Image (cartoon, grey):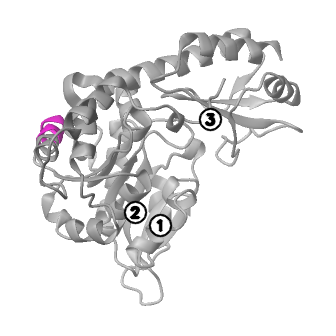
Amino acid sequence: MNFVSDNLAGASAPVMQAMAAANDGVSAAYGNDAWTKRVEGLFADLFEREVAVFLVATGTAANALALASLVDPWGAVLCHHEAHVAADECGAPEFFTGGAKIVGLPGDGCKLVPEVVADQLARMAAGSLHQVQPQMLSITQASECGLVYRPAEVAALKAAIRPRGLKLHMDGARFANALVALGCTPAEISWKAGVDVLSFGGTKNGAFAAEAVIVFDPADAAEMPWRRKRGGHTLSKGRLIGAQFEGLLTSGHWLDLARHANAMAGRLADAVAAAGRLRLAWPCEANEVFLVLPPSAQAGLAAQGVRYIVWSDAALPPGQGLQHGEVVGRFVCSFATQPEEVDRLAAVLNAA
């Protein structure tokens, strides 16, 4: 029973089949292949507009390049203080931007609200030579605590930064999971709500190694070809990333995978809630379940060899902090998670 991350699952069968088909013969290199061109068209159809698409192999590259393309070295990126770009990229955003400052902000469930963002902007004097200049707001969809931003919430954040001219970046490592949870279109939760650049995740959702930087105004992407090449992510055999996305996006396969992962997480959350012995740290809105685990539950999980991650409690709502010996446990479901695994885990948790 390993619920550490959706990164642990392999690639889905259609993705592997698409890669195998693309592997035959020879093709143009460095993204000039037919697969990449078709995927660029698929993304344009998906988002209902012309977009600039840059395929890369990792989420860290997608985030770092997305930020670097629109933030100066003397600029600042505002984000939640537990966001991946602040806490989990080993300084890659700062490195690729040439030194831009990452400014972490508080928020329950690792979500930001306009009031907090506006307050921070008011503290950063426009044009001051003594301060970095805020140039981008980055939000994570779904958040690091498994919560989703509704289109209206994204639009409200955009409204908060618009007077200062900041761009809005969305880290969409679990974009698919958020999308199926919301039941909206990709356009409604991205550019129509004010997102300027999206890190579109595939690896957590059935790909082998495939991420995409989607720039909604191609004029904003002028530097990206050179930044991607300089960053080591213009793959010579780029067709194999393109093939992965073709396998994912064709016939809505990516949404089916995310829908299954979300359903497995919901199954776990419902089973635990029905037993009434443990509480959810945050509502289960995508494919992650966060549980407050007393020492007895921790011992029971360890005895059964269950793998999970002990998570930060810094974004718990006020008044819902941990008691002595409690921890927050993160349990992640993937497209490959089976109902039987979830039921076994629920039985262990409810017996603890």
Is residue 44 on the magenta stretch?
yes
Residue drawn at 70 percent across, 44 percent down: 313
Is residue 157 shown to the viewer in this render?
yes
**SS at mark 3?**
loop
Q: Badge 1 local density, few (<14 within 10 Å), some, or many (20+)? A: some
Q: Are marks 2 and 1 in contact (CB under 8 Å)?
A: yes
Is 280 drawn above or below residue 311 in the view shown?
Answer: above
In the picture, residue 193 is in which quadrant? top left
Question: Going by the picture, which residue comes out furthest to the front?
Answer: 25
Which corner quadrant holds the C terminus? Answer: top right
Q: Earlier in the sequence, mark 3 or mark 1?
A: 3
- Distance between the Cα atoms at labels 3 and 1? 23 Å
The residue indicated by pointer 2 is 64
Where is residue 315 shown, x and y percent of the image?
64, 46
- Locate the N terminus and report the quarter of the image it occupies: top right
- Between discs 3 and 2, the one toward the N terminus: 3
* 195 or 347, nearer to the observer: 347
Between 15 and 199, which is closer to the camera in this rendering? 15
**What distance separates the C-alpha of mark 3 from that of mark 2?**
24 Å
Q: Which residue is mark 3?
A: 4
The answer to whether 17 is drawn above or below residue 126 in the figure is above
**Magenta-span inclusion, residue 130:** no
Disc 1 marks which amino acid?
Ala
Q: Where is residue 301 shown, x and y percent of the image?
A: 79, 25
Horizontal side of 232 relative to 276 (left or right) equals: left
| Magenta-highlighted residues | 41-47
